[in-house]
Image: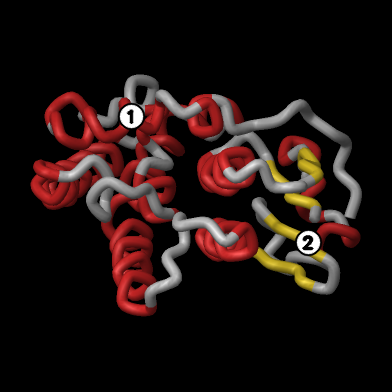
């Protein structure tokens, strides 16, 4: 298996899952600054020109949530439950996260961390204000849900935990008001204790499809 990644927002969770599960994955760094994701070789495996992308034999898989689920299922891990009803619950939280939680942590990540790197000018105050407003609104839902749980599904981690937490390691730099939500902060501190989450990116290897 090859996992093509960059040290950016969505690849973080795919890399973390691969490392957490000790999967036999070759990590291939894609240099976005050199537009390697737009090379003909890369577009042949992911026509979107984005990372992460997983190659496993004849399987070419993109989208970070799908990659997480694939790796967990392949490993036989409880990160992807075997029970159908629990799988639906995982999908519910993955969908909620994409539409209502990481959507806004990702916006703050982009405004504060990515725009200065790629020279897109200062943060957009209106965009930041809107993303912060919606983060607080949705964080209140997650914080309430976690009030008596160690993980999203009680005591056992699933891929949903990794997905929901994607933006939180950048909370300070991206001005994400994590401290206002003690249950989320406590839950994420537990994830931070995992080496795979705290340090998900491997040593860089040259990109090659």
Quadrant of the image containing the C terminus = bottom right
Q: Is residue 63 above or below residue 21?
A: below
Closest to the observer, 143 or 25:
25
Write down the quadrant of residue 49 in the picture: bottom right
Q: Residue furthest top?
A: 172
Front of the two marks 2 and 1: 1
Q: Going by the image, does 77 lie left or right of 154?
A: right
What residue does disc 2 label? 55
Task: Give percent across and percent down for residue 191.
Answer: 38, 32
Task: Give percent across and percent down for residue 141.
Answer: 12, 52
Q: Going by the image, does 107 lie left or right of 128?
A: right
Write down the quadrant of residue 89 in the picture: bottom left
Count the marks: how many?
2
Q: Going by the image, does 76 lie left or right of 95?
A: right
Determine the residue positioned at 42% across, 65% down: 81
Closest to the observer, 8 or 85:
85
| Element on which disc 1 rests | helix
What residue does disc 1 label? 190
Closest to the observer, 169 or 134:
169
Closest to the observer, 176 or 204:
204
Label 1 packing within 10 angstroms: few (<14), some (14-19), many (20+): few
Asked whether the residues under the numbered discs 2 and 1 touch, taking CB atoms below 8 Å apart as contact, a structural biologist would say no
Determine the residue positioned at 11% across, 43% down: 148
| Earlier sequence position, callout 2 versus callout 1 | 2
């Amino acid at each position: 298996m090859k996992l093509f990644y960059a040290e950016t927002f969505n690849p973080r969770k795919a890399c973390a899952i691969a490392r957490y599960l000790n999967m036999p994955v070759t990590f291939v760094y894609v240099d976005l600054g050199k537009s390697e994701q737009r090379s003909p070789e890369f577009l042949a495996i992911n026509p979107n020109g984005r990372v992460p992308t997983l190659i496993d034999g004849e399987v070419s898989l993109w989208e970070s949530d799908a990659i997480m689920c694939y790796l967990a299922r392949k490993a036989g891990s409880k990160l992807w439950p075997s029970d159908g009803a629990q799988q639906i619950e995982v999908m519910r939280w993955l969908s909620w996260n994409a539409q209502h939680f990481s959507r806004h942590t990702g916006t703050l990540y982009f405004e504060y961390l990515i725009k200065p790197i790629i020279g897109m000018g200062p943060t957009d105050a209106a965009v930041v204000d809107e993303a912060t407003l919606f983060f607080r609104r949705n964080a209140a839902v997650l914080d309430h849900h976690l009030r008596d749980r160690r993980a999203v599904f009680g005591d056992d981690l699933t891929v949903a935990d990794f997905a929901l937490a994607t933006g939180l390691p950048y909370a300070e730099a991206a001005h994400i008001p994590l401290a206002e939500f003690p249950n989320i902060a406590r839950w994420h501190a537990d994830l931070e204790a995992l080496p795979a989450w705290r340090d998900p990116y491997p040593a860089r290897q040259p990109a090659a499809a």
